[in-house]
Amino acid sequence: MNDWASILPLVILVIAFLVLVIRPARANRRQFQQLQSTLAPGQQVMLASGIFGEIVTIGDETIELRIAAQTVVTVNRHAVSRVVTPASENETSTDL
């Protein structure tokens, strides 16, 4: 019985680590993979650096992004942090 009492805090620590660290990280990774699989030309996106643009073409590892008229840049596909919808653009402009 005394052995279980000494191991119990370690078991609780491992379970807390799984619940507080591993599960949220796994959910974030799953959400990011879903975002990457739904990217399509013509979508408005925001890069992790805060640059907004429209997807022109999509490759395996890169995306061509139109950030201004006649300005297309090539970025890593994993730099896309979110897809911007017209409703979210209106919401952010009214928050200011």
Image: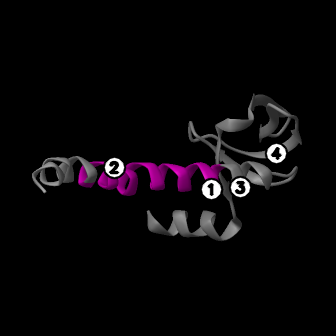
Along the line of sight, the residue nearer the viewer: 3 or 43:
3
State left or right for residue 21 relative to residue 31: left
Q: Are marks 3 and 1 in contact (CB under 8 Å)?
A: yes
Q: In what quadrant of the picture does the N terminus appear? A: bottom left
Gap between marks 4 and 1, in whole Å?
Answer: 20 Å
Secondary structure beneath dot 2 equals helix
Gap between marks 3 and 4, in whole Å?
Answer: 17 Å
- Given the image, on which type of amino acid does mark 3 rest? Gln
Nearer mark to the viewer, of 4 and 1: 1
Q: Which residue is mark 2?
A: 17
Q: Are marks 1 and 2 in contact (CB under 8 Å)?
A: no
Toward which corner of the image does residue 70 lie, by quadrant? top right
The disc placed on residue 31 is 1
Q: Which residue reaches farthest left? A: 2
Q: Are marks 4 and 2 in contact (CB under 8 Å)?
A: no
Specify few, some or many for label 4: CA neighbours under 10 Å numbering under 14, 14-19, or 20 or more: many
Colour mode of the rendering: one colour
Q: Which residue is mark 3?
A: 34
Q: Which residues are magenta?
A: 12-32
- Given the image, on which type of amino acid does mark 4 rest? Ile
Q: Are marks 3 and 4 in contact (CB under 8 Å)?
A: no
Q: Which residue is mark 4?
A: 55
- Given the image, on which type of amino acid does mark 2 rest? Phe
Q: Indicate yes or no whether the magenta region holds residue 23.
A: yes
